[in-house]
Amino acid sequence: MYSVIYNVWLIPLLPILATSWIALGYIFNFNRGESGEAQTAKTSLTAASLSLILILIIDAYAFLYSAPGQLKLSPWLISGDYTIYISFTLDNFALAMATLISTISLLTIKFSVNYMHREAGFQRFFMILNLFSGAMLLIVMAGNAVFTFIGWELAGVSSFLLIGHSFDRDTATRNANRAFITNRIGDAFFIIAFALSFIWLGSIEWNDILNHNAGLSSLQIGLIAGSFLIAALAKSALFPFSPWIARALEGPTPSSAIFYGSLMVHAGIYLVIRIEPLFVIDTALLPLLVLIGLLTTLYGFFTSLVQTDVKSTLIFSVTTHVGLMLFICGLGLFELASWYLILHAIWRAYQFLNAPAHMHMMSRPTRKVHPLFKNFTRLYTASIQRFWLDHIADWLLVKPIEELSRDARNFDEKVVNRIVGLPAQATTITSLDENETSSDIGKGHGMAGKTMEWLASILGWFEDHLVLQGGEGRFIKLIHHLGGYVLQIDQLLSQPRYLLILIITTFVVIL
């Protein structure tokens, strides 16, 4: 039993290996189509079952003796004075969360086998679902912030891919972009948090960050905890990052259940509970947790009252409860929040998986407007509009990133491709041999876009007037003319008398 503990790395790795196997099968064409569904399902169920069995063995050891705690296996990356270890945290909370994740993942995979039968993208769905399962296990069991971040990113990528599962639908791809961009902001602050830990503590092991920070000032601890907090807010769709999660329901129902109803939505709360010692030291952040939790709860509560379909109602109810968990953490009741998290995850998984059957069984019209809004029409309007957070988030976060991406693409097409000699787009140069050029260099957006447009215009003029011109432009003629002078100088220097003069001149300068 004890040897299983040192093979704990297999628990998150097995679902990821299942992902790789399904991907290889699809590439080499031995699990495609309806005939390959059984093999894909068997691979997924086997990996999920083995992970759960290994976790249960470690749970039994922890019950009989005690939780293993922090476990360092070997160095993973060494750079100068910094070392990142392959390490795992196997305390009671991590083991409870890992057991929960493995159980819900196994049940969701089993449910999905029949639910996704004959659906386009069956293999792709299970490949991403297994990747997500391994990512969540890595988040809760990682012994340092870097491996937690790896799981954090894999979960985010899985979420993006499953929201956009029906990539032929514009709504799905747009909502996948919304979720991806919003979560990248939180990821940036996660990187800042463990970078600060490296700089100030020389370590990113959770044990060192949480328990060996006596040499840090309250400001330094507050910056580390605050950066982790922003990452948690984005991942759990807490205020002001709440809008993206309702848009994420474009994916198939099983992914909605495991991602946004049950597991990934609680990853941010898990992180907040994990870094409890930092909040205990720097209590100035606790009122912020209370405020953000309260705002998220009110947002989710009022918005859920005006929804007319079961999945939207459930997701805003999830937002309400996740806000309450953060509110409880702000009151210092972290253990209560952990129990709340586990029970809520179980209940929401059941509700979301049951939602399709519930929708089919409904024979009555949707519910009427809640009586609360009869005397508060403005509140009703705000709730219908989701308090305009969607529009604000799009304006502040999504659209600027999309415009920057568009500008970067234009810069690649109009400038970089020309510099390196790649074929230009049809809108710029249709035929270099025939000297056909276009004056439309590209339109930029914002300051960066205008700068790119100006630079592209200069380079376009340079090509049109000096380089192209049938291969005999003024610039080419100038280069040929200068090359002739250089060739004459080289011929003169090769003659003995001029070479002797050059050597004598060199000695004079040296002496």
Image (tube, grey):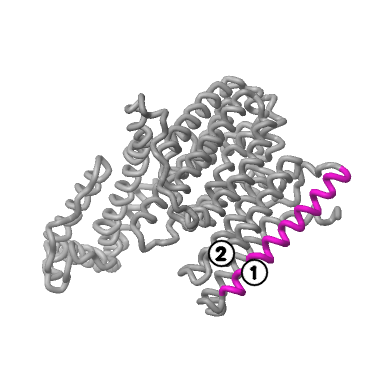
Q: Secondary structure at mark 1?
A: helix
* Marks 1 and 2 in Cβ contact (< 8 Å): yes
Q: Is residue 169 left or right of residue 59?
A: left
User: What is the magenta segment's predominant secondary structure?
Assistant: helix
- Magenta stretch: give its range: 37-65
Q: Write the residue at 59% across / 64% down.
A: 19
Residue 415 point in image, percent of width and height: 26, 56
Residue for badge 1? 43
Residue 488 point in image, percent of width and height: 21, 66
Residue 334 point in image, percent of width and height: 66, 30
Assess disc 1: are there few (<14), some (14-19) or many (≥20) residues with their C-alpha within 10 Å of its C-alpha.
many
Q: Amino acid at mark 1?
A: Thr
Residue 249 point in image, percent of width and height: 45, 51
* Residue 236 included in the magenta stretch of the image: no
Residue 274 in sight in this render: no
Q: Is residue 127 left or right of residue 214?
A: left
Q: Amino acid at mark 2?
A: Phe
Q: Earlier in the sequence, mark 1 or mark 2?
A: 1
Please state which of residues 502 and 276 is positioned toward the viewer in this rendering: 276
Assess disc 2: are there few (<14), some (14-19) or many (≥20) residues with their C-alpha within 10 Å of its C-alpha.
many
* Residue 40 included in the magenta stretch of the image: yes
Quadrant where the image shows the N terminus: bottom right
Residue for badge 2? 126
Q: Write the residue at 64% across / 61% down.
A: 15
